Image (spheres, grey):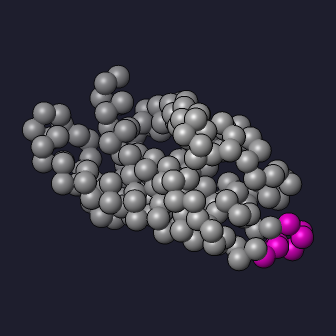
């Protein structure tokens, strides 16, 4: 079990960091330029910003580069099943940010307002797309995917409560 936990987290840390950082950036410029979709509703809404898009990718890559730097030290103590490289980090971080944007697009199509809870979608949109995209070049173990699908909603909910308490978010979900 420890093997699953370590390798799962080692894999997903760049995506988690990419998904977390837009909340901290408080962007002002929506990536949809306030344009509506053919249904008359916004493409993504004010919560998906240019600053969040690029900031999330850059922060995820920065953390991923730290992981690459730490890999030789970690592998002295623990045999990882894979090693990050720039491509894995880029795919994970862009997949996470794009997954969150796709989730927002889906919410707008169902007329769900920004900030309203959508269980499962809110917690797993970024994870699923990040894993799908990185699986192009990494052989993902099913046990890692299952573990991450179970633990990510718990971590996501905990992070949102912390962000709410720190007044970074207006709602605790």
Identified at 85% across, 66% down, the residue is: 41
Asked if residue 17 lies in the magenta stretch, the reply is: no
Using the image as rendered, state which of residue 126 and residue 132 is in the foreground.
Answer: 126
Q: Can the viewer see residue 97 in this picture?
A: no
The furthest residue to the top: 1
Residue 36 image offset from top left, x and y in percent: 82, 73
Image quadrant containing the N terminus: top left
Identified at 71% across, 77% down, the residue is: 33
Q: Height in image: 100 above or below 87?
A: above
Identified at 89% across, 70% down, the residue is: 40
Residue 63 image offset from top left, x and y in percent: 32, 54
Q: How many marks are shown on the rendered structure?
A: 0
User: In terms of secondary structure, what is the magenta stretch mainly?
Assistant: loop
Give the left or right position of residue 128, taking residue 72 as reference.
right
Residue 92 image offset from top left, x and y in percent: 43, 56
Q: Can the viewer see residue 126 in this picture?
A: yes
Identify the magenta region. Answer: 35-41
Give the left or right position of residue 154, taking residue 57 as reference.
right
Q: Height in image: 135 above or below 4?
A: below
Give the left or right position of residue 143, taking residue 165 as reference.
left
Image quadrant containing the C terminus: top right
The furthest residue to the right: 40
Residue 136 image offset from top left, x and y in percent: 43, 59
The furthest residue to the front: 167
Identified at 86% across, 54% down, the residue is: 111
Using the image as rendered, state which of residue 36 and residue 166 is in the foreground.
Answer: 166
């Amino acid at each position: 079990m420890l093997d699953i936990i370590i390798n799962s987290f080692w894999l997903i840390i760049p995506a988690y960091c990419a998904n977390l950082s837009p909340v901290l950036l408080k962007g002002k410029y929506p990536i949809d330029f306030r344009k509506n979709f053919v249904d008359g509703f916004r493409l993504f809404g004010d919560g998906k910003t240019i600053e969040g898009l690029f900031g999330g990718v850059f922060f995820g890559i920065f953390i991923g580069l730290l992981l690459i730097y730490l890999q030789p030290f970690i592998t002295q103590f623990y045999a990882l099943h894979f090693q990050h490289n720039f491509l894995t980090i880029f795919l994970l971080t862009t997949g996470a940010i794009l997954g969150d944007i796709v989730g927002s697009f889906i919410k707008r199509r169902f007329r769900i307002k920004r900030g309203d809870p959508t269980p499962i979608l809110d917690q797993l949109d970024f994870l699923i797309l990040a894993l799908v995209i990185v699986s192009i070049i990494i052989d993902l173990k099913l046990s890692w995917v299952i573990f991450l699908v179970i633990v990510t909603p718990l971590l996501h909910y905990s992070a949102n409560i912390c962000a709410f308490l720190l007044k970074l978010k207006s709602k605790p979900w």
